[in-house]
Amino acid sequence: SLIFLAGLGLWSSALLFVQEQPLFTAAFAAFVVAATACAIADMTFVGYRKASLALMRSATFDLSKLILVPPLVVSAGAFGIFASWTVAVTVSLALALFVLLPAVSPGYRPLPSFHWREATQLARFSLVNYAGEGLWQAPGWLLPIFIVNLSGPSANAFFYISWALTGLILS
């Protein structure tokens, strides 16, 4: 998220307002960290053959953001939409870390740790996997930026709605 924010002037001057407002910058960075941790938690649930817990976490995220949109839009304007996503993903991450993960892994505590041996063993696979996943996801990341730069935010909003609906239909 920090690389994306630092490079906004290079790849999307239409989004520079995010970089210029400290609250937007902090909320964006928090959202990216929490969303990434949620994805890791979801894959952990799948690994434990408890995909229903990933669905539960995701449903919590979806319901929370729907409940939060009206009051946050009224109080914070357009930023309220993004704020509802940030708060909702944080709520669903807390559910995953403090309730769901301990349920599937007795003794689990959400404490950070690092083990060099395991990290070096996984590094090669992870880097190749990360590059492949990045190429797979590139259209979804780049097309909205291209469209906001070429056609503006309104056109991007219409594009993104159709893009999201298409993704829903094809998945």
Image (cartoon, helix red, strand yellow):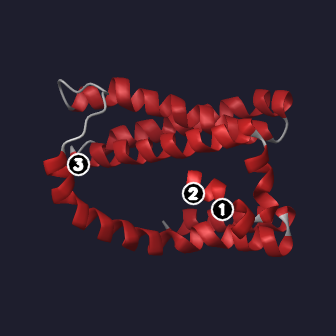
Image quadrant where residue 66 sits: top right
Residue at (82, 76) in percent of width and height:
150
The image position of residue 10, as x and y in percent, is 71, 68
Residue at (19, 56) in percent of width and height:
120
Circle 3 is placed at which residue position? Answer: 47
Q: Amino acid at mark 1?
A: Gly
Query: Neighbour class for label 2 at 10 Å: few (<14), some, many (≥20)?
Result: few
Q: Is residue 98 visible?
A: yes
Classify mark 2: helix, strand or loop.
helix
The image position of residue 140, as x and y in percent, is 58, 68
Circle 1 is placed at which residue position? Answer: 7
Q: Amino acid at mark 3?
A: Gly
Classify mark 3: helix, strand or loop.
helix
Question: How far is mark 2 from mark 3, CA to CA?
Answer: 30 Å
In primary-sequence order, the first of circles 1 and 3 is: 1
Circle 2 is placed at which residue position? Answer: 3
